[in-house]
């Protein structure tokens, strides 16, 4: 994969332009672009600008409804259920997490669960929203079923990420990870590189471990059986039932409490139906928020400074790699696959954006 | 390991006798015995009656204070911080989860965090307390540091279990698992059997994978380095940073919010300092609790009925194995190691209980 560097401001301006051409308001486009580009800034290319084309397809097919507005359909001082009415996932997620934050600031904590949404980007964006306001933030989402439960051979669960962020110095704790051993993107990288995948990642159509990334991906696309293993692999000996359990925890806060579609029923027959969950907790509900923040900071420092394994130079705490990636990307630009640029050029023609005014000096393909 | 079968009622009567001789009231002994025996009934021998002797040692050494009462030191309608004052973990846990349940019934959800407690048995007991009352229950605890963060070689984290239970038919969802790949008990079983452990379980003193259970356990006891890997193993390729992340999530709800001891500082110099976290959520805060319960039940049924991998007969949902174990144990008796019985005989002499009146017909060793 050949990559080029694109300055943040250039990519941001392009995204703003395109999302407005999709029919979103300037304010809405601001939110969607922010979610997408945080992913690129954090080095998670799979959930960044490269998804522009997929969002466009979702809009064109009617799966994502541009003018849908999220609606609170049930509410208490500590909770809410939001119906996304099949709108854009980022707008629904932003609305729902802001609602959780507002309630948490008033009463100490809140959970907002969402049904009938669509792909919302990285879960961590929403956890970070709460953290940026001094709260603990958690975000969950289900997704298309591509993960196989322990001892199964049919994908029944999404990659179902759980994200949590909490204020700390010198940078927040920020953990955002799928509950599967890896995400689909890793399989795609190995397929492109024609490298065998580790035998604890994927299952073939019969439920046996499979080291052929292309075979697993093809079967997923055809719904022919097999898929990605939960975190912990395929056997209880390596903790498969635990990854499967965390996927279920995610499902409870997303699809179960919202009465929405579980992963095995989502993204079918032109309907997304993706469900999310958001939790905001005010540390001040447990005493001195500053002291609690310092307590976490101290523990994170102890972890980073604890003895390293032979051959390892550094112990990371969660969120540290994202801080390093941000410093790099804001200085050197975002990493963008030339294939993504080519897709963006086609997309520009389709929606009437002036591709060359943004990327003409970089890409002439 | 030779095992004998002990009827539930016999073991329960013995535990009630012994805990009262330790100095606990009848009511307190009832709670402690219930927590311990639920573990045996669920087939988790490591956290059941076999710990009687360890609790006795904790009391004798002064680490566990028999007459300490848990105290609410900070409180809001949705939250509380409890100081355990170094009392018995089960009593503190029971008190704190009941507090979370009471608040959740009043306002929809609550989090109670606990510091200065001791080992509280299985986390799942407390999650089940909430579930038995129609709520979602979650329980967390930190513990002695025996788990090594990704790329480290010093144990900094406890096995830090996360438990969640939620009402469903025909049986509740019940997930209770350490965030490490396995617990210490598994290492002890392999050491006894003189079998090599899988290479994704333990680290030697230098942070290299190690298949010798005895070596890892000896190093843990001597604090000589190494320990148990997080769920996901030792490398990011297999998701090590995710297990490490879930351990941190656990630590946040236990030691961080309570301003208590993080795992790396607990159980040192005669002080336990174990921290717990409890969450109770009323599904009615999200609408029709019965409909939500049915929605979860339907999904669990779909999971169980989904296609099995070649060579696997059954897909379990979390909590199903515990239901099967309960049926077996209540009919056939609890599985008790004869070594545990021998320890219980010594303990009986020490505290003045009549061992033979309980177990004389089974054990004469």
Image: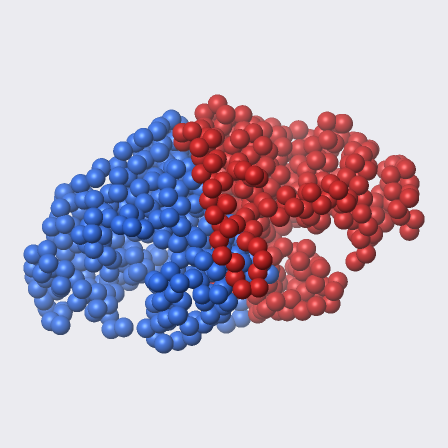
Chain colours: A red, B blue
Q: Position of residue A156 (x, y in %)?
A: 56, 55
Tell which of B37 and A222 is nearer to you.
B37
Q: Position of residue A286 (x, y in %)?
A: 40, 31
Looking at the figure, which quarter contains the C terminus of chain B? bottom left
Q: Position of residue A322 (x, y in %)?
A: 63, 45
Residue at screen point 68% across, 38% down: A35
Q: Is residue A159 visible?
A: yes
Please, is residue B365 above or below residue B21 in the view?
below
Q: Is residue A157 left or right of residue B127?
A: right
Count of numbered marks: 0
Q: Is residue B300 visible?
A: no
Residue at screen point 58% across, 32% down: A132
Q: Is residue B321 left or right of residue A71?
A: left
Please, is residue B365 above or below residue A89 in the view?
below
Q: Quadrant of residue B228?
A: bottom left
Residue at screen point 18% across, 58% down: B11
Residue at screen point 66% across, 38% down: A89
Tell which of A75 and B287 is nearer to you.
A75
Tell which of B337 and A44 is nearer to you.
A44
Looking at the figure, which quarter contains the N terminus of chain B? bottom left
């Amino acid at each position: 994969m050949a990559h080029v560097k694109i300055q943040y401001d250039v990519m941001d301006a392009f995204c703003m332009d395109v999302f407005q051409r999709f029919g979103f308001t300037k304010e809405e486009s601001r939110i969607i672009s922010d979610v997408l580009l945080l992913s690129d800034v954090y080095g998670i290319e799979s959930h960044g600008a490269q998804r522009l084309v997929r969002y466009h397809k979702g809009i064109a097919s009617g799966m994502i409804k541009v003018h849908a507005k999220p609606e609170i359909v049930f509410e208490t001082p500590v909770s809410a259920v939001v119906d996304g009415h099949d709108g854009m996932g980022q707008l629904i997620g932003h609305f729902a997490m802001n609602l959780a934050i507002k309630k948490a600031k008033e009463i100490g904590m809140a959970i907002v669960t969402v049904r009938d949404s669509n792909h919302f980007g990285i879960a961590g964006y929403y956890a970070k929203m709460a953290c940026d306001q001094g709260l603990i933030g958690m975000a969950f989402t289900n997704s298309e079923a591509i993960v196989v439960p322990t001892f199964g051979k049919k994908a029944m669960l999404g990659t179902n990420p759980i994200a949590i962020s909490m204020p700390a110095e010198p940078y927040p704790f920020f953990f955002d990870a799928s509950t599967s051993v890896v995400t689909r993107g890793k399989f795609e990288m190995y397929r492109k590189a024609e490298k065998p995948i580790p035998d604890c990642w994927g299952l073939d159509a019969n439920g046996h471990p499979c080291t052929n990334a292309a075979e697993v991906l093809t079967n997923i696309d055809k719904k022919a059986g097999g898929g990605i293993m939960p975190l912990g692999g395929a056997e209880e000996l390596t903790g498969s039932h635990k990854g499967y359990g965390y996927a279920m925890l995610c499902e409870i806060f997303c699809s179960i409490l919202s009465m929405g579609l579980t992963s095995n029923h989502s993204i079918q027959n032109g309907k997304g139906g993706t469900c999310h969950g958001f939790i905001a907790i005010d540390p001040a509900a447990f005493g001195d928020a500053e002291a609690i923040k310092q307590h976490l900071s101290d523990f994170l420092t102890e972890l980073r400074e604890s003895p390293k394994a032979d051959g390892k130079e550094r112990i990371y705490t969660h969120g540290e790699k994202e801080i390093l990636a941000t410093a790099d990307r804001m200085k050197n630009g975002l990493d963008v696959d030339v294939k993504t640029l080519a897709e963006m050029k086609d997309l520009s023609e389709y929606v009437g954006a002036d591709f060359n005014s943004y990327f003409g000096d970089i890409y002439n393909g």
